[in-house]
């Protein structure tokens, strides 16, 4: 345990895990209750276009990726709001298109080599101090917005039509939420890679939802679970010499399956108690 | 009450793709009215309600709610959507769902005051859900959830209340309770607009009636007559047999008779 804390990169990795978990808990909860995980996946994959663009222009990866991802997320959000029935197709097309653009732009830049794997599966062990600062800033932005607009987000997520009629600016809130998702996705790409973003965005929140029915608590529990998964995943990947991003997701996935089993048992238990209660009442 | 009609709908049409959902609809009601909008499923009842609330924009015609564009005035309206249209798995407590009715009142980014929370709590008591306020909506029955939606709409003390099939998931006793509640509200001055396919119950409480099946027939005196039913439902016998109270028909016929005698 102590031996790996000696390494700077390990300390940074653990810290990065904590920071993304906060964003994952808060924004992932909004993603899950608003059923936007496909959109989150679309933003993550389309972000590759931003990486390609940065390579092509010869600017730092995040300088190109952040605006590219914010723009593509707004486009996906706009398209899926306008065409609700076809939103999955539209997101699917943009998902693939973003990746294709990224690959082609990198092709067009002769002599440029990017470590594709590190973007696909993350490079949490290579997180720099500057990236940590960026993550902390993004966390602060996310927390400030979600805490400040909590009652509005809750109202919109539960019943958008009622929220609209009662005077809440739901369209504006929707796009704010989409931008928060994009920011979270960008952070996550660093840690688990764009292929695994949806998993870390949705698994902790989905598990939390099984055990609480309060949105605020769901966010807190999801954040704590995220920290648990990233830490455990890092330790395991260190000891067994495995890819860290994939190990984190593996642990999260196993937890998810265990939670499903526990919950269905609990439900059956409750059902049993209720039925035996009824039987007693009849007698 | 101040001379402005509560609702004014003039030559309104709305289409889904190329099919008319609502066709050249005209009617208006005053404040204090109790309007029943009846019609078959898919006849455009909910669409009309969404148009009046400004959730949908008409493709033709104009709509005024409390004298102005619905987007400007709907904050004074309460809206009770169909219980089945809400997500009952959503992680939210009864008390938080009711407080939602006040969320817009304090403005973006402001917390609810303790007065707001008290108002929400007393509204929960009023609809009879006091002991259930800390349960999640998923733990309630359909009827109880319906009452949560009612309390959420009422907590902002709306001038005009819109309800979409408020008794679809409730048994007969619960249905009577809800209608009696609405009657009390209406007697206290709240305008009530109720969408339902249940003709028999609604006729006891309403003051005016609109039948809609794409086209709309409006009776300011609340009389549901055979012609109206035939035109909108297309099957007169069924609905008359299943309980449009005869009272309504008798009164109607008597009035015709009186006129004839005069």
Image: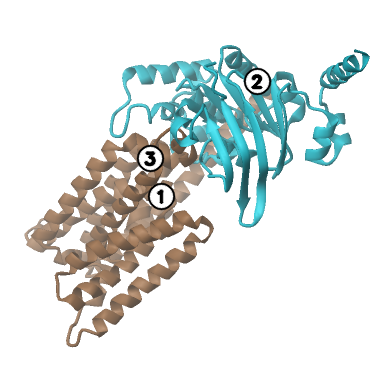
- How far across and how far down the image is residue B183, in percent? 63, 16
Residue at 66% over, 44% down? B22
Residue at 44% over, 28% down? B101
Is residue B253 something one can see in this rendering? yes
- Residue that label 2 marks: B179
Q: Are marks 1 and 3 in contact (CB under 8 Å)?
A: no
Check the image and report above or below for A3 versus A93: above
Of marks 3 and 2, the one in the foreground: 3
> Residue A37's quadrant in the figure?
bottom left
For numbered disc 2, what is the local secondary structure? helix
Residue at 25% over, 56% down? A230
Of marks 1 and 3, the one in the foreground: 3
Q: Residues within 10 Å of mark 3 (few under 14, many from 20)?
A: some
Q: Are marks 3 and 2 in contact (CB under 8 Å)?
A: no
> Residue B174's quadrant in the figure?
top right
Is residue B169 something one can see in this rendering? no
- Residue that label 3 marks: A169
**Chain under numbered label 2:** B
Q: Is residue B94 left or right of residue A216?
A: right
Of mark 1 and mark 3, the one earlier in the sequence is 1
Look at chain A in the picture and name its colour.
brown
**What is the spatial separation of the Cα atoms under label 1 and label 3, in whole angstroms?**
21 Å
**What is the spatial separation of the Cα atoms under label 2 and label 1, in whole angstroms?**
37 Å
């Amino acid at each position: 345990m102590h031996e790996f804390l000696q390494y700077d990169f390990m300390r940074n990795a653990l810290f990065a895990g904590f920071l993304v978990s906060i964003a994952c808990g808060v924004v992932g909860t909004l993603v899950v209750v608003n059923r936007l995980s496909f959109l989150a996946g679309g933003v993550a994959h389309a972000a590759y276009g931003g990486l390609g663009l940065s390579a092509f222009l010869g600017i730092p990866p995040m300088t190109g990726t952040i605006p590219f991802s914010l723009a593509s997320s707004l486009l996906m959000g706009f398209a899926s709001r306008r065409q609700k029935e076809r939103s999955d197709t539209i997101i699917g097309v943009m998902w693939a298109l973003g990746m294709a653009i990224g690959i082609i732009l990198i092709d067009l830049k002769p002599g440029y080599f990017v470590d594709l794997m590190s973007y696909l599966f993350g490079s949490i062990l290579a997180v720099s101090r500057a990236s940590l600062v960026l993550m902390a800033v993004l966390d602060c932005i996310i927390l400030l917005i979600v805490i400040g607009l909590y009652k509005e987000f809750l109202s919109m997520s539960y019943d958008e039509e009622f929220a609209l009629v009662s005077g809440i600016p739901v369209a504006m809130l929707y796009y704010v939420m989409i931008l928060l998702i994009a920011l979270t996705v960008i952070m996550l790409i660093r840690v688990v890679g764009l292929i695994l973003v949806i998993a870390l965005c949705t698994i902790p929140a989905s598990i939390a939802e099984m055990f609480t029915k309060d949105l605020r608590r769901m966010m807190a529990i999801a954040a704590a679970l995220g920290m648990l998964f990233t830490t455990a995943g890092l330790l395991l990947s260190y000891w067994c010499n495995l890819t860290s991003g994939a190990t984190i997701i593996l642990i999260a996935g196993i937890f998810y399956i265990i939670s499903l089993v526990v919950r269905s048992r609990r439900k059956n238990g409750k059902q049993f108690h209720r039925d035996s209660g009824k039987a007693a009442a009849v007698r | 009450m101040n001379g402005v009609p509560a609702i004014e709908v003039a030559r309104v049409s709305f289409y889904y793709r190329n099919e008319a959902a609502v066709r050249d609809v005209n009617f208006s009601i005053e404040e204090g009215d109790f309007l029943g909008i009846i019609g078959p499923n898919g006849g455009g009842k909910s669409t009309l309600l969404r148009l009046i609330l400004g959730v949908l924009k008409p493709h033709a015609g104009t709509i005024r709610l409390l004298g102005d564009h619905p987007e400007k005035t709907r904050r004074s309206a309460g809206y009770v959507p169909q219980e089945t249209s809400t997500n009952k798995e959503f992680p939210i407590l009864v008390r938080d769902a009711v407080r939602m009715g006040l969320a817009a009142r304090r403005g973006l980014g402001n917390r609810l005051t303790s007065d707001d929370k008290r108002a929400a709590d007393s509204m929960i008591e009023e609809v009879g859900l006091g002991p259930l306020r800390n349960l999640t909506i998923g733990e309630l029955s359909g009827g109880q959830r319906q009452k949560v939606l009612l309390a959420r709409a009422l907590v902002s003390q709306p001038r005009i209340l819109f309800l979409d099939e408020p008794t679809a998931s409730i048994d007969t006793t619960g249905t009577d309770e809800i209608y009696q509640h609405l009657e009390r509200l209406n007697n206290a001055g709240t305008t009530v607009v109720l969408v339902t396919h249940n003709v028999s119950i609604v006729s006891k409480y309403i003051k005016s009636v609109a039948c809609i099946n794409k086209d709309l027939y409006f009776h300011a005196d609340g009389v549901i007559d055979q012609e109206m039913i035939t035109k909108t439902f297309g099957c007169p016998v069924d609905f008359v047999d299943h309980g449009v109270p005869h009272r309504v028909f008798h009164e109607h016929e008597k009035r015709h008779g009186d006129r004839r005698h005069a």
